[in-house]
Image (spheres, grey):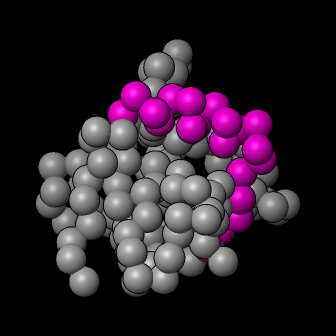
Amino acid sequence: MLQQGRILWANVPRPDGSPGKPRTVVIVTATEEISETEPFVVVAITSTFQEPLREAEVRLPFHPHGGGRIGLKRPTVAVCDWLVELRKAQVLQEVGSLPTTVMVEIMEKTRSFLHLIQKAPPG
């Protein structure tokens, strides 16, 4: 079930609009606003980052064997200024979900970047 805080594996276009690749993302749209037919907003997750983290990045919990409810197997960050609209058809797999404390931090950082959302294509 799609809901805020769920980690997904999805086809995500690059920030410049060119075809992207499958990558992990986390849903930031409120659960009650997600529908079967309308796009929802996600934040991209990447394992390519530098220390110290940028202001727009949030470190995500993981387990080397991918166990537990989170499902991430290596160090990653949510890139809160990389917001993308997705449609359910772009979702390849549900991976896990983030703890509320991490989602609060992501939502706080995401607010100032909402104007950067890459719009989903029609249909």
Q: Is residue 31 left or right of residue 22?
A: right
- The overriding secondary structure of the stretch rendered in magenta is helix
Position in image of residue 34 (x %, y %): 52, 69
The answer to whether residue 113 of the structure is visible from this angle is: yes
In this view, 120 is above or below 35: above
Position in image of residue 60 (x %, y %): 66, 40
Q: Which image quarter: residue 73? A: bottom right
Q: Residue at 46% across / 55% down in the picture?
A: 42
Q: Residue at 44% across / 50% down in the picture?
A: 44
Q: Is residue 47 magenta?
A: no
Position in image of residue 80 (x %, y %): 45, 37
Check the image and name the residue furthest to the right: 68
Q: Is residue 99 magenta?
A: yes
Q: Is residue 41 left or right of residue 4?
A: left
| Image quadrant occupied by the N terminus | bottom right
The foreground one among 123 and 32 is 32
Q: Is residue 83 left or right of residue 122?
A: right
Q: Residue at 37% across / 47% down in the picture?
A: 83
Check the image and name the residue furthest to the top: 52
Q: Magenta residues, as a range?
A: 94-113
The foreground one among 50 and 34 is 34
The foreground one among 15 and 64 is 15
Q: Which image quarter: residue 48? A: top left
